[in-house]
Image (tube, grey):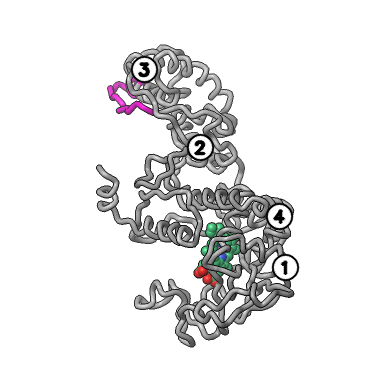
Amino acid sequence: MAYQEKIRKRSVLADLIILAGTVAYDSMGLKTFGFGFGREDIWGPEIDTYWGSEKEWLARSEERYDDLDDPSTLENPLAATHMGLIYVNPEGVNGVPGPQKTADQIRETFARMAMNDEETAALTCGGHTVGKTHGRGAVDNIGVAPEAAGLEEQGLGWSNPGQDGKATNAFTSGIEGAWTTHPTTFDMGFFDMLFGHEWHQVKSPAGAWQWEPVEIKEEDKPVDPTDPSVRHNPIMTDADMAMKVDPIYNEYCQKFMADPEYFRDTFARAWFKLTHRDMGPRANYLGPDVPKEDLIWQDPVPAGNTNYDVAAVKAKIAASGLSNEDLITTAWDSARTYRGSDMRGGANGARIRLAPQKDWVGNEPDRLAKVLAVLEPIAAEAGASVADVIVLGGNVGVENAIKAAGFSVEVPFASGRGDATDEMTDAASFSVLEPISDGFRNWQKQEYAVSQKK
Ligand code: HEM
């Protein structure tokens, strides 16, 4: 089916939102890295999503950290620092400016989205190379948040009865101002601004903390979005200041400034990752702009062989001396890492043979090594992938166990999984898939105490 037909058959608001963002960067002069259609829309709230234990938006961060000074103690699997934000508080930790502390939180938050320091610096600096923040006017003038507004106001941002709420008067974060001299051009303006000036803390018209230059030439100030005859001070959020103050982010910024082409490419790739990472394997991407290159965060898996004698492989497994328990446990362990939210993990690729999965306590490394030592030669001899043979082993175990109970069942099987290599595996990003409990074994990695509060 031609991709146009496939797209026409889907509801693709999710695709269009991401495409619009990508086209926006394109239109402002960035050569974007590519785009894939293929997302799905949902039509109701996802009631199984855990957003945190807080009962109100922007509750203090202490609610989700054991120790707020140690960002690694952020409750798993959360990544944002507050209920209601996607990254960190733009004014500073709990709304108190302090760029180094904000940098430490950014590092943890972005790592939990599989972004390394270089990608994080590129995303923050590149993201804020264009656009502006919105907080002109007193906070008392605005009405309810978008999701609490009436049906007729949905999709129009914060209700803003005191003003028209458009353009200059749009109100969102409460921080007010653009980052660069030319906020509709993807240029090096963010770095010129951040590193070319000293910054001090001021309050926005809405009372939010932001940073403004101590001194700046009139012609370097961004013009008003609707009245080009008026210029305003540029701003930085605490998260932007973090890019200058934190030594590691600073080093990446220096690298970007020395090589603008490298910056553009790094940002374009990181933007592509940010907007495609939850789509699962590359095979799910549709359309003419899908990049040809395999990217490590896509967890690439080579195509597997389907042309081998499945019955003969099953017979060899059955005669191998491995117990039903060994076979079923290994197949289960290889499959259970699969998660629906971003389609990572699972049996395909047989990454259970590779670091870090082969060493996870929940995979019983000694037993796993023993089982693999038997299954791998069987796979090699048959021309099947180890991934297929592990799953087939599970089927053999289940069928044998059923037979021992006096019944006969053949478990269906589809061949064609491939085997990934270490080079195809972003080992660090797999740590988030580690099982911490296992109902099949009645096992948990550590004793958890459930706090009364939660
Ligand atoms: C370090 C984490 C980040 C923080 C704390 C942050 C914070 C903010 C804030 C407070 C605003 C202003 C919202 C408003 O008042 O309308 C904003 C706007 C914006 N951000 Fe970020 N951001 C972060 C990362 C990113 C990333 C990763 C991107 C994209 C790659 C991005 C792209 C943008 C853009 C384009 C705007 C302007 C929107 C407009 O013009 O209406 N930001 N950000």
Query: Tags 4 and 3 in contact by the CB under 8 Å rule?
Result: no
Query: In the image, is the residue at mark 1 within 8 Å of ligand 1 by its beta carbon?
Result: no
Residue 205 horizontal/vertical position (percent) = 61, 82
Q: Nearer the viewer, residue 448 or 14?
A: 14
Counting from the top left corner in percent of width and height, residue 319 is at: 41, 12
Q: Indicate which disc, 4 or 2, sits on the residue closer to the N terminus.
A: 4
Which residue is pictured at 36% across the width and 46% down the height? 288
**Discs 4/3, front:** 4
The quadrant the N terminus occupies is top left
> For residue 301, which quarter of the picture?
top left
Q: Residue furthest bottom?
A: 162
Residue type at mark 2: give it: Asn
Question: Height in image: 202 above or below 29?
Answer: below
Q: Amino acid at mark 3?
A: Lys
For the residues labelled 4 and 2, the Cα–Cα distance comes to 47 Å
* Type of amino acid at the residue the image marks with label 4: Asn
Mark 1 and mark 4: Cα distance apart in space: 15 Å
Q: Who is closer to the viewer here, 410 or 19? A: 19
Q: Quadrant of residue 203?
A: bottom right
First of labels 1, 2 by sequence position: 1
- Secondary structure of the residue carrying tag 1 is loop
Residue at disc 3, secondary structure: helix
Q: Nearer the viewer, mark 1 or mark 4?
A: 1
Which residue was labeled with disc 1?
A: 197
- Specify the segment rendered in magenta: 400-417
Kindly report the distance in space between the C-alpha atoms of the residues bearing marks 1 and 3.
Answer: 69 Å
